[in-house]
Amino acid sequence: MRIADMLYAIASWLESPNNEALLLAEYDDDCAKVVAESCVSAAHTLRIAAENVDNLEPAEDSHITPESLEELANLASALDSSDDPALKKQASVIDELLLTIAANPDALTNKKAADEKKIDEIKKKYENPRKDLEESNKIADSKKAIDKSQMTKEYKILEAPLSSRYCPDHAGAQIARIGEHIWQCELDKKTYNFDTGFDLINGSKVPGGDVSQQTQGIEMPQQSIFNTREGRLGENS
C-alpha cells in the first residue's frame, strides 16, 4: 500500500462522524466541539501531506503482467469447459475484462467519434430530402399565402359583431332566431351562436360574447335620473 493512500485513509477516518474519538466525546458538547475541530484540522493536514507524498514516492508497480493475464485466460478457459452454467458465466466475465484491458486506450474515444459522425451523416440524409421537398413544393410560399388569406385567423372580442341580424358569412342575407341565442342563415341553414362563438366559412374563429357585457360594471347614482342637461354640465365643470 502506498503512503499517500494510507494518509488519505486516515484523513477520511478523522473526518467521519462515526470515528471513536467523536463518539467518546458526545457526553459533553464543549469536549465534542474541541475533538471535532481537532479531527478536521488533522485531516486537512494529512490530505496536504498525502498530496505532497504522492508526488514524491514512486508509482506502484502494476500487478497486471503478461504472465498474470495468461494465467487469467487459462482460468477462463477452464471455467468455460465445465458443465456448470455459473462457472461459464464467470468465464464470460473474465473474457470481457481481458478484452477491456487489452484494448487500446483511445479505442473508446475513436468509437464515440465514429458513431457521432455516422449519426450526423444519417441526419443529413433525412434532412436534405425534406429541404428539397419544401423548396420544390414551395412550402414557404404556401405558408405566406395562408397567413395572408386569414383562413386561420382567430378574432378577438369586439373584432367581430356581438350580435347581428345578418349572416356573418353572407353579406346582406337574413338570419332567423331558432333558439336561445341561436340564429340560422336562410341561405345554407348554418346556425350561429353569438354567446358561445362560431367558425366562419373561411376558417376564422369568432369568440363568444354578449352585448349586455358592454355595460357591466358601469354604475350610476340613482338620483342622476332626475338631473337636467344643465345640471350634468355643471357637475362635469
Image: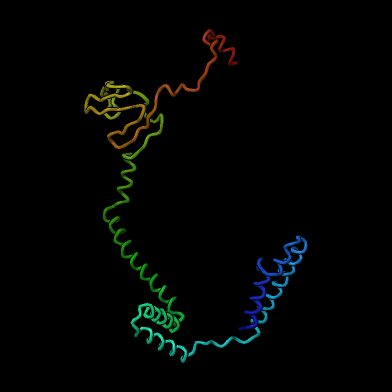
Q: Along the horizontal axis of the image, is 163 left or right of 235?
A: left
184 or 27: nearer the viewer: 27
Expressed as whole percent of the image width and height from the top left, the position of residue 21 reads: 71, 69
**Residue 108 found in image quarter:** bottom left
Q: For the point 59% across and 86% down, which residue is it?
A: 59
Please tell me whether residue 229 is drawn above or below residue 130 in the rendered image. Answer: above
Which residue reaches farthest bottom? Answer: 67
Please tell me whether residue 86 is drawn above or below residue 183 in the rendered image. Answer: below
**Residue 172 found in image quarter:** top left
Q: How many marks?
A: 0
The chosen color scheme is rainbow
**Residue 118 found in image quarter:** bottom left
86 or 47: nearer the viewer: 86
Q: For the point 41% across and 29% down, which residue is it?
A: 158
Expressed as whole percent of the image width and height from the top left, the position of residue 130 reads: 30, 58
Please tell me whether residue 155 is drawn above or below residue 31 in the rendered image. Answer: above
Expressed as whole percent of the image width and height from the top left, the position of residue 107 reads: 43, 79
- The quadrant of the rendering that contains the N terminus is bottom right
66 or 181: nearer the viewer: 66
118 or 133: nearer the viewer: 118
Q: Along the horizontal axis of the image, is 10 left or right of 163?
A: right
Expressed as whole percent of the image width and height from the top left, the position of residue 13 reads: 66, 72
- The quadrant of the rendering that contains the C terminus is top right
Q: For the point 65% across and 82% down, which residue is it?
A: 3
